[in-house]
Image: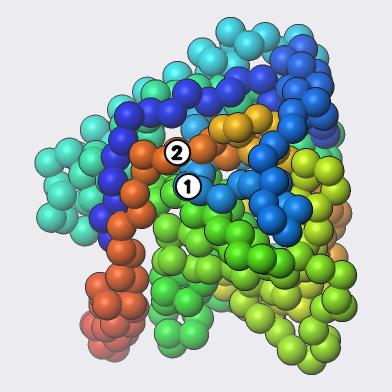
């Protein structure tokens, strides 16, 4: 699980996060740019978004709106940039306190070189949070059944391998785990064979093959870890609707630090808007009435990063966390007896 580090790619700070609050002046200029930009087109008519993309700059913006910014509509670009820099400093300081830089061989000690927030230059994305819907900037509460299932799963986390998080098992981090910014492995390769868009994530090397057509989704009895996607282009925007999700009791939530579940009711709609030659504006809308009390949306940029190289993740081959965690749990049980 090695990644390459390249010179930081400057993020286009003016993003049109059309649902974002507070709205910023630079967002309007980006919206205009996306409407007037004429991208290169492929033989099948698709705007050309083939290449390597990276969303690591978005990790300097919090997932949810900080409480101190609630209700404010006067957050300036300078304040957003200052907050991004402070977030980066805070992560480094916390890691120094934990001794990461001197504990590369210890449990959970990857060393600073592993994390994008140590290498990248912090740049704000033009909004105070990734969550842009609801207006509160906060993810809606989970349903009572979801809270109960997550609590039960955490209590039984190491009773059996199938209780562990699906990403730890090297199966899948789900659509959110592939597309949301994380601490490392943020390289995303997009390919466009005729009639398709293929998204290859560096993390676990998940691959999403998205047909660009209007054929109906698979029969509802056929369920998949990343759902059944269908895509179409609306001008400069690729719209992808995914349904037919497999129910998973323990799948990574919208951020690396959250646990969630994925129900069969889940529906995800993503939009990739070509803002310019080096920027995609990405939005994702989550609908899962069995897990969340209301829909929610997030938005952030993907930046073209042709100098980035995806390295082999080798998740299954190097995955000792499952047998070690289960083995450790059995030792603890024996001691308690």
Look at the image and tell me whether residue 289 can be seen: yes
Q: Is residue 216 left or right of residue 227?
A: right
Q: Is residue 106 left or right of residue 40?
A: left
Residue 187 lies, with reference to residue 98, above or below; the image says below
Tell which circle, 1 or 2, labels the residue nearer the N-terminal end.
Answer: 1
Residue position for label 2: 305
Q: Residue at horizontal 87%, vertical 70%?
A: 214
Quadrant position of the N terminus in the picture: bottom left
Residue 216 coordinates in the image, percent (x, y): 87, 78
Residue 116 coordinates in the image, percent (x, y): 36, 39
Q: Residue at horizontal 49%, vertical 59%?
A: 201
Dot 1 surroundings within 10 Å: few (below 14), some, or many (20 or more)?
many
118 and 156: which is toward the camera? 118
Residue 3 lies, with reference to residue 149, above or below; the image says above
Place residue 335 in its image quadrant: bottom left
Residue 259 coordinates in the image, percent (x, y): 57, 61
Q: Are marks 1 and 2 in contact (CB under 8 Å)?
A: yes
193 and 305: which is toward the camera? 193
Q: Is residue 231 left or right of residue 335?
A: right
Dot 2 surroundings within 10 Å: few (below 14), some, or many (20 or more)?
many
Q: Secondary structure at mark 2?
A: loop
Look at the image and tell me whether residue 259 can be seen: no
Farthest residue to the front: give it: 43
Rendered image coloring scheme: rainbow
Q: Residue at horizontal 28%, vertical 46%?
A: 4
Residue 280 coordinates in the image, percent (x, y): 64, 38
Residue position for label 1: 52
Distance between the alpha carbons at the discs numbered 1 and 2: 5 Å
Quadrant position of the C terminus in the picture: bottom left
Q: Residue at horizontal 49%, vertical 42%?
A: 54
């Amino acid at each position: 699980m090695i990644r390459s580090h390249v010179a930081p790619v400057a993020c286009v700070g003016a993003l049109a996060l059309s649902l974002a609050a507070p709205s910023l002046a630079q967002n309007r200029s980006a919206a205009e740019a996306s409407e007037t930009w004429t991208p290169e087109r492929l033989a099948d008519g698709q705007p050309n978004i083939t290449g390597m993309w990276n969303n690591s700059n978005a990790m300097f913006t919090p997932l949810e709106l900080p409480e101190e910014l609630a209700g404010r509509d006067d957050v300036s670009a300078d304040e957003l940039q200052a907050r991004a820099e402070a977030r980066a400093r805070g992560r480094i300081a916390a890691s120094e306190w934990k001794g990461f830089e001197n504990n590369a061989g210890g449990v959970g000690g990857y060393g600073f070189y592993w994390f994008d927030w140590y290498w990248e230059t912090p740049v704000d994305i033009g909004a105070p949070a990734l969550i842009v819907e609801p207006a509160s900037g906060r993810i809606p509460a989970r349903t009572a059944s979801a809270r109960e299932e997550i609590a039960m799963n955490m209590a039984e986390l190491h009773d059996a391998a199938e209780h562990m998080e699906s990403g730890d098992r090297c199966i899948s981090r789900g659509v959110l785990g592939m597309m949301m910014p994380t601490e490392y492995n943020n390289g995303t390769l997009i390919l466009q064979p005729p009639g398709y868009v293929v998204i290859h994530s560096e993390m676990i090397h998940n691959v999403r093959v998205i047909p660009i057509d209007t054929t109906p989704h698979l029969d509802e009895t056929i369920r998949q870890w990343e759902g059944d996607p269908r895509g179409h282009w609306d001008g400069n925007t690729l719209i992808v609707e995914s349904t037919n999700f497999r129910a998973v009791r323990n799948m990574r939530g919208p951020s690396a630090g959250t646990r969630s579940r994925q129900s069969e009711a889940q529906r995800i709609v993503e939009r990739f808007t070509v803002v310019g030659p080096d920027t995609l504006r990405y939005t994702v809308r989550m609908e899962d009435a069995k897990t969340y009390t209301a829909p929610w949306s997030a938005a952030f940029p993907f930046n073209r990063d042709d100098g980035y190289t995806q390295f082999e993740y080798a998740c299954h081959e190097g995955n000792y966390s499952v047998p070690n965690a289960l083995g450790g749990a059995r030792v603890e049980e024996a001691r308690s007896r």
